[in-house]
Image: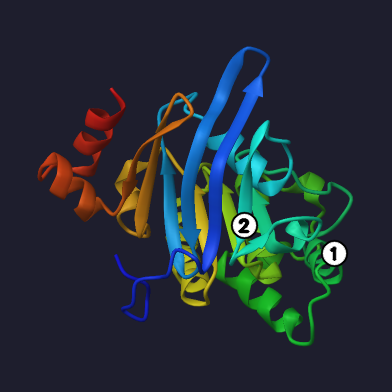
Amino acid sequence: MPSSNGSHPNPEDGLQVHGLTKRFGSTVAVDDLHFDARAGEILALLGPNGAGKTTTLLCLAGLLRPNAGQMRWQRTLLGPQRGRMMALIPETPEVYEGLTVWEHMVFVARSCRLGNGWEARAEYLLERLAIEDRRDTLGAALSKGMRQKLLIACAAVAATPVLLLDEPMIGLDPQGQRELRRLLLEVRSEGAAVIVSTHLLEYVDTFADRLLILKEGRAQALGTIAELRGTLGDQSLEELFFRITE
């Protein structure tokens, strides 16, 4: 799937990951991983349990220190500014229990030093995700699905160049899943590099431009669904996934 303007994103105009390795004692969770996540593209990160998907995202976000590897954004080696370059929505949605929904948006706006107009964008996102009626609700009173929606709204209003999502569909109702897919496509069209880890294969071809399939911390396949089918035969995504990972 090309980007929204019909062009194919340049690999150098985005996030490049070279030799990413993370060990926990004698266990190698991510093993010499090389890939790129291009600006204006959604990369789906797939793999069975224990494949290293979450560890990869945590390393990218700076929440885990890798044992080896480099990460660059548009030819610039990532450093202290990584926190402003990337936003991570974790699988377990943790929010500030003492802040209201709207105070979360204010916190993000001030932390990211957003300019004028962020309030309108924040209002729009809360309405899109059907949580505008929870504007004054404390984080402690939100359900898991509502917390997930709030984190999605926070990440979208921050408009970081790289957006990382770990199993974002889990906990969302069907309407929330539909709106999330639409928002991902919007964020992509605005030029962000988006990486989505998911087990829900039935949704992948509705938003992903390329796939990165992991097994035991190593890359097994990287490309579009069409490219993988061209290599392995015309099969469903589920059949491709199992053929690659089993």
Q: Residue at x 22, y 52 (%)?
A: 227
Q: Is residue 29 left or right of residue 224?
A: right
Q: Is residue 235 visible?
A: yes
Q: CA distance from mark 1 to mark 2?
A: 27 Å
- The residue positioned 65% from the left and 40% from the top of the image is 58
In the rendered view, tell whether residue 123 sits above or below residue 48. Answer: below
Query: Mark 1 falls on what kind of element?
Result: helix
Q: Is residue 30 above or below residue 19?
A: above
Q: Name the quadrant of the C terminus.
A: top left
> Mark 2 is on which residue type?
Arg
Of marks 1 and 2, the one in the foreground: 2
Q: Quadrant of the N terminus?
A: bottom left
Which residue position is annotated with label 1? 107
Q: Tell me if residue 232 comes above or below residue 95 in the rendering.
A: above
Q: Nearer the viewer, residue 125 or 2?
A: 2
Of label 1 and label 2, which has the lower sequence position? 2
**Residue drawn 49% across the image and 66% down it:** 12
Residue, x 76% and y 55% (percent of image)? 79
* Quadrant of the image occupied by residue 46: top left
Helix, strand or loop for disc 2? strand
Identified by mark 1, the residue type is Phe
Q: Is residue 229 above or below residue 54?
A: below
Residue 164 picture location, percent across and down: 58, 52
- How far from the left and from the top, in percent, is residue 198? 45, 42
Residue 72, numbered circle: 2
Residue 230 % position (x, y): 14, 49
